[in-house]
Image (tube, coloured by chain):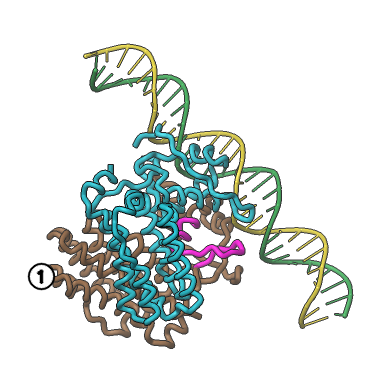
Chain colours: A cyan, B brown, C green, D yellow
Amino acid sequence: MDKHSPITITLAQRDDAVTITQWVYNTLRQAVLLGQIPPGRALTIRELASLMGVSPMPVREALRQLSAEGALEILGNRRVVVPEMTAMKFNELVEARIALEPHAALKAMPYIDATRLAELRNIDRGIDRAEAAGDAEAVTSLNQQFHRTIYTANPHQVTLPLIESLWLQLAPFMRVSAESLEEYYQIDRHQEALAAIEKQDPMALALAIEADIRDGCAFAKAPEKLKRLLG
Amino acid sequence: MDKHSPITITLAQRDDAVTITQWVYNTLRQAVLLGQIPPGRALTIRELASLMGVSPMPVREALRQLSAEGALEILGNRRVVVPEMTAMKFNELVEARIALEPHAALKAMPYIDATRLAELRNIDRGIDRAEAAGDAEAVTSLNQQFHRTIYTANPHQVTLPLIESLWLQLAPFMRVSAESLEEYYQIDRHQEALAAIEKQDPMALALAIEADIRDGCAFAKAPEKLKRLLG
DNA sequence: ATCTTGAAAATGTGATCACAATTTTGTGAT
DNA sequence: ATCACAAAATTGTGATCACATTTTCAAGAT
């Protein structure tokens, strides 16, 4: 709603091989994922453009793409915002993840070879390190990479864009979860998933993925937290 | 691949209350849904712009949005195309629908009131009429509307955009199915769905929706058809 | 204080232009 | 005929500009 609360977005590394539009897109996407843009805060093309030192044009295109992906919402009255969240919507998003991700994992399992399995183990070790270091941002980023690495094993895979859309919509509201990571005793669902892949046990993998998603969003069941989260 | 095959897209009704970008988007979306753009046919911004009598700008934005929705694909080499289809990908898309849509129907069922139920019956009658008239385009359009009307009953619903993305990706390859509609004896899955809603029987509704999806894509199991379809 | 109102500032939209990169085409050699 | 290659045409990108619409906000009325 308000416009005057200043926002700070960390500008992504600018790679010359990439178009400006792509760079703007990456930067804004990351800002949404990191929760740097308060939900409801009105964004204007020109504000973002000057903030990032580019012309309004690439910002326009990036905003449209992010809106199509559900990361942003174009309000009727010519305003672009990170959509507000409600408890019901949060649940629906989590349940949509559970409808899609175990299915994606099942379809990917036969394609996971030794190389990819090793890659998964490596990512999981990275998560452990990040948890030990208390680096919440790295944890969520690596966690996503863990899931992505499973799903993309399937060469005919079509669900990842849908799944990433759900991640984008949830991410701004996962900060609280990540910040209070240590409060929760986390059963290592990734270990369960890796074991299931080794055994080629589809049901076990689906269950591990579902449990991992539920654990990651468990704080939503603590009402006082969710309330604080939704402002 | 080729560029010279001429394409004809039916221009949507231009409503003055709507931006040009939106109109271009609607027109192109419809063209994709109706299979008017051959997969692999290279599209250029300027070509479409002059085809539709607008400047390149709104076309650019519409193309980006459609790409984000999976309807189009931006090739690395600066070409935009309707993505090519493979048998495997087709199956994955259908299975993704089955992962999402019964779930969406389940979550919507408690919200379907008498008004909406009447609306559903009305749409179903329209489908019968269109089938009798042999109007394949109307059948697919009304069929989508039937599903949409169920899912949108849920006010907290978040999956419709994902589902519509899957429809967009499948649609260009459903023409064959629609054209040979009469070859298949169709059990009326919509009647089953309506009965399930009346009885508030979740499992029956989920099964009816899944069966409806499978029936609609059944031709994919006739290999010679799918082959013809995929060129 | 609160609401109304109107002028000024800001905004999204869409057209046009310049430019570098890519694709296409035409020419000549084999 | 087929291929190689350079010239020409075409393309996406991004900046700038004009304009109608909307938002903002201060001055005046209640």
Q: Which residues fall within the magenta stretch?
A: B63-82
Q: Position of residue B220 (x, y in %)?
A: 38, 82
Identify the chain of the residue marked 1, using the numbered disc in the image. B
Residue at which label 1 appears? B199
B73 drawn magenta: yes
Say whether residue B44 is left or right of residue B134: right
Q: Position of residue A95 (x, y in %)?
A: 27, 63
The N terminus of chain A lies in which quarter of the figure?
A: top left
Residue at image location 60% in from the left, 55% down from the top: A18
Q: Position of residue B154 (x, y in %)?
A: 22, 58
Q: Is residue A165 above or below residue B19?
A: below
Residue B164 placement: quadrant: bottom left
Residue placed farthest to the front in the image?
A132
The C terminus of chain A lies in which quarter of the figure?
A: top left
Judge the density around disc 1: few (<14), some (14-19), many (≥20) Cα neighbours within 10 Å: few
B132 drawn magenta: no
